[in-house]
Image: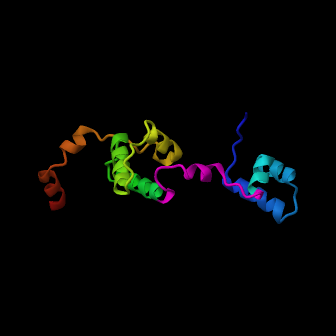
Amino acid sequence: MVRRNYTEDDVAEAIFDTTDRGLSQNEAALKRGVPQWTISRRLSGQASRNECIQAHQRIPKSQEETLIRWVLRQESLGYAPSHSQLRACVEAILQQQGDNKPLGKHWTTRFVKRHPKLSTKIGKRQEAARFDGFTPKAVNWYFDI
């Protein structure tokens, strides 16, 4: 089975083409590069694959977005969390919510795969010389200039 590359915006435009612009589902599918059966299913009220999968995720989308912002913020400060640190953080959040089941074996890998902007941020280590140079004496010298 060949999976085509299209976005949710393409699907929304195709649905708009069929409902408001008077195109048939086949015409809209060809115009937008979306499978006709996808348009048909969405018009009948079925949710997208991502929306269906989200119901089975351990943390809600809003918490995922907060977690992404935290990782990006940590990275901008030079302290990008490792996979194990991210995993420990999420497990702590889940435990606070009363969910004591451990995360799956590949949860962190799949989380990063779901959010491509994190792929280069997680686990990037700083060189030891940078941390060794960050001493009170060096900081005071910098601010005395």
Residue 47 seen in render: yes
Task: State the quadrant of the N terminus.
Answer: top right
Query: Residue 83's x, y, as percent?
Result: 37, 41
Query: Residue 18's x, y, as percent?
Result: 83, 59
Residue 10 as seen in the image, left or right of residue 97: right
Between 118 and 129, which is closer to the camera in this rendering? Answer: 118
Q: Residue at x 13, y 53 (%)?
A: 136
Q: Residue at x 70, y 38 (%)?
A: 3
Task: State the quadrant of the C terminus.
Answer: bottom left
Query: Residue 92's x, y, as percent?
Result: 33, 51
* Magenta-span inclusion, residue 107: no
The type of colouring in the image is rainbow
Between 129 and 28, which is closer to the camera in this rendering? Answer: 28
* Whether residue 13 is situated above or below residue 104 in the rendered picture: below
Determine the residue located farthest toward the top in the rendered image.
1
* Magenta-span inclusion, residue 61: yes
Residue 76 as seen in the image, left or right of residue 128: right
Determine the residue located farthest toward the left in the rendered image.
137
Q: Residue at x 46, y 46 (%)?
A: 118
Which residue range is magenta in the image? Answer: 43-62
Between 37 and 103, which is closer to the camera in this rendering? Answer: 103
Between 17 and 39, which is closer to the camera in this rendering? Answer: 39
Residue 124 seen in render: no
Determine the residue located farthest toward the bottom in the rendered image.
20
Q: How many marks?
A: 0
Residue 55 as seen in the image, left or right of residue 92: right
Q: Residue at x 77, y 57 (%)?
A: 44
